[in-house]
Image (cartoon, rainbow, N blue to C red):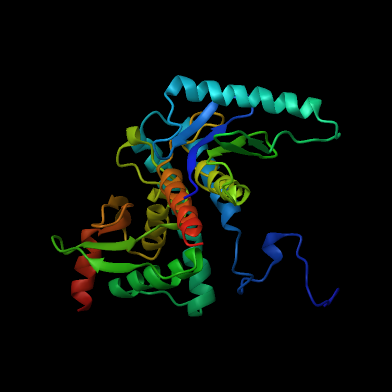
Amino acid sequence: MIGVGKVKQYSNVLDRPLSKGKQEVSLSAFAFLFSELVQYNQTQVDNIAELERRLEDAGYAVGARVLELFCHREKGNRRETRLLGILSFVHSTIWKILFGKVADSLEKGTEHEDEYMISEKELLVNRFISIPKDMGAFNCGAFVAGIVKGVLDNAGFPAVVTAHFVPVEGQQRPRTTILIKFAEEVLAREARLG
Amino acid sequence: MAAIYSLYIINKSGGLIFYKDYGSAGRMDTNDSLRVASLWHSMHAISQQLSPISGCSGTELLEADTFDLHCFQSLTGTKFFVVCEPGTLHMEGLLKYIYELYTDYVLKNPFYEMEMPIRCELFDINLVQAVQKDRVALLGR
């Protein structure tokens, strides 16, 4: 190989090997970038639902990509095909790599069979964000919901994913719950597989 | 017990963007606090010009009979100042810490407009903790 050295510099991102790189990214740099993303999208919309949708779309693109990459890196090009498998892949593997920790909890909805919830006491993207009172229940976690949706959709588990603030007793700050509602076909397939 | 009377944050043009008072002493109404803010902004600028030392960054501490005023100016011209009981220690540290909170919870918040009054829940929560922690540290000595 030409130019063999201790540290190789790749000028083009596409030339870099896909294996694990340095895992850490500056939180401040990310927070500013994310803040700009939200601010930019805010100028492009005229209501909050639209802003939420745009953030979700931005996350969707990330999700689609991380699914490919992490299936290759972590699982030797194998992909989860069962419902619980893919959910724990999102809850553990993806969360760990994107946010540096496993999500606080993964629960099944009590009222509906097709609903699952990933809860996080303090979502990384919301660490520095205070939602103004006039924006109501808007949650920047919509971006993370988009990531989850991107992963699930591309893994063959179409679902509707939304982010919500849930107040916690005795806590000043509400936690964020990512609500996953799977499409009917997913549950039908699960039932068939037994 | 040494106490902090109030905290001000003023933007680079001298407008008050944050004001909070602690305890009963030195409490002011909104107009007075705005006046103090712009007064301090001007005095700070004048002191910079009058200083015999070239490259002076302005008054850092004003000692009066009934209060001390500690001021910290960031590189972008935002000024943080606390009014406290005479002889209160560690105010520079507290101001630096408040500046840190400002950069985290105000500047990284996409819903904050630069140079406008600060209304960020997380900033308020963390500020209360910082001031309380400081009080505990002072009491413990």
Does residue B118 appear anywhere in the picture?
A: no
| Displayed quadrant of residue A95 | bottom left
Residue B112 sits above or below residue A145 on the image: above
Does A113 appear above or below B7? below
Residue B131 rendering spot, x and y as whole percentages: 47, 49
Nearer-the-camera pick, A136 or A73: A136
Is residue A107 shown to the viewer in this render?
yes
Count the labels in the image: 0
Residue found at x 62% / y 26% = B40
Instruction: Name the image quarter holding the N terminus of chain A.
Output: bottom right
Residue A67 position in % (x across, y down) = 46, 65
Q: Give whichever of A128, B48 is nearer the camera.
A: B48
Question: Could you tell me which quadrant the C terminus of chain A lies in?
Answer: bottom left
Q: Is residue A21 above or below residue B14?
A: below
Question: In front here: B70 or A136?
Answer: B70
Q: Which residue is pictured at 85% across the width and 35% down the height?
A: B53
| Residue found farthest to the front | B65
Q: Percent x, y for residue B94?
A: 57, 49
